[in-house]
Amino acid sequence: MHLAPYDLHTHTTCSDGALSPEELVDRAVARGVGTLAITDHDTVAAWPAAVARSGDNLALVCGIELSARWGSLEVHVVGLNITPDTPQLTHGIALQRTAREERARRIAHRLSRRRVPEPLEGARRHAGTGIIGRPHFAAHLVECGLVPDRKTAFKRYLGRGKVGDVRTEWPDLNTVTQWIHAAGGQAVLAHPLKYNVSATKRRALLSAFCDAGGDAVEVVSGHQHPDMTAHVAALCKRFDLMGSVGSDFHSPQHSWSDLGCGLELPRSVTPVWAAWA
Ligand code: AMP
Ligand code: MN
Ligand code: MN
Ligand code: MN
């Protein structure tokens, strides 16, 4: 059974989140979330621990946030209500892990030429047993005293056009959608307003996502102005896609996007969870 309110986009220490799967489940319950999807970057490792922790008052949905490529743009596709140990998805996750490891080596090489001390070791330490990502390099740069905070680390070292911005051969939209569908889930285009593109290009992205078999769009992503929600809801209608909502929660320190906060899907949009009944 799935219960309102829904938060269908969250992270744990298995990727770049601050809370363990158990801590995330506890926080979701404490904040009155009824249905929670854990959607770590390119991994479902949090699932067993989260299931073991959750009780009757929280419905858990198995999810993932897959990095994908559309043209020269890096986009994120959330898979929801997936069966985690499906062979095709497991194969896809292994490819993503390899791509992330390879990318981490290249980022580290470039950072070391900028005299950042031991970047790969530092990032790995911050990733722990979780999948490695740029936020772990950001944490290392902060720790080394090179930047005051992670945001500045992205601005100066890791963001678009900076030294740590390396081209990664992520799979295309068709491929990630197929992995999600093979696992019995729905493919959701994550945070459509966070890609730095024109409105025309955003519509082209949605069109390509539909052609790839995409099912839904994140209508509400974290703390968002109602005008923006209405804008994405209209895109949903136009492309006949279902809608999802998620905080994209990473850490309790980011109080502007806490679990379950302000995540109401407009009534005009068919919820992605309608497919789960
Ligand atoms: P990756 O998946 O390794 O490419 O890292 C992307 C992640 O970095 C996103 O999911 C965010 O959690 C985080 N991120 C992206 N941009 C920024 C930023 N400007 N400041 C802080 N964190 C960021
Ligand atoms: Mn992240
Ligand atoms: Mn994302
Ligand atoms: Mn996310």
Image (spheres, rainbow, N blue to C red):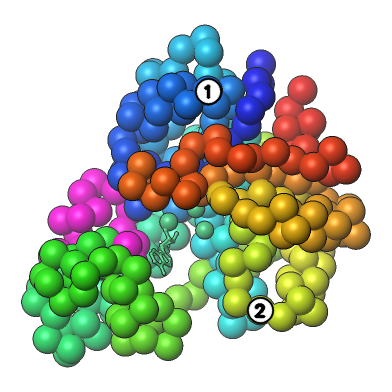
Give coordinates of residue 160: x percent, y percent.
45, 82
The amino acid type of the residue labelled 2 equals Val
Decide: few, some or many residues near mark 1? Use Cα within 10 Å; few <14, some 14-19, many ≥20: some
- Dominant secondary-structure state across the stretch colored magenta: helix
Q: Quadrant of ligand 1?
A: bottom left
Give coordinates of residue 144: x percent, y percent.
11, 70
Q: Residue furthest top?
A: 56
Decide: few, some or many residues near mark 2? Use Cα within 10 Å; few <14, some 14-19, many ≥20: few
Location of the C terminus (image quadrant): top right
x 26%, y 66%: residue: 149
Left or right, residue 205 beside residue 82: right
Which residue is identified by label 2?
197
The stretch in magenta equals 121-135
Give coordinates of residue 76: x percent, y percent.
57, 60
Instruction: Judge whether 267 appears above or below 153 on screen.
Output: above
Give coordinates of residue 155: x percent, y percent.
36, 78
Earlier sequence position, callout 1 versus callout 2: 1
Instruction: Judge whether 183 appears above or below 161 on screen.
Output: above
x 73%, y 32%: residue: 273
Which residue is identified by label 1?
32
x 53%, y 23%: residue: 32
262 or 219: nearer the viewer: 262
Instruction: Judge whether 204 appears above or below 174 on screen.
Output: below
- Figure quadrant of residue 165: bottom left
x 48%, y 26%: residue: 31
Magenta region includes residue 134: yes
Magenta region includes residue 234: no
- Figure quadrant of residue 13: top left
Label 1 to label 2: alpha-carbon separation: 35 Å
The amino acid type of the residue labelled 1 equals Gly
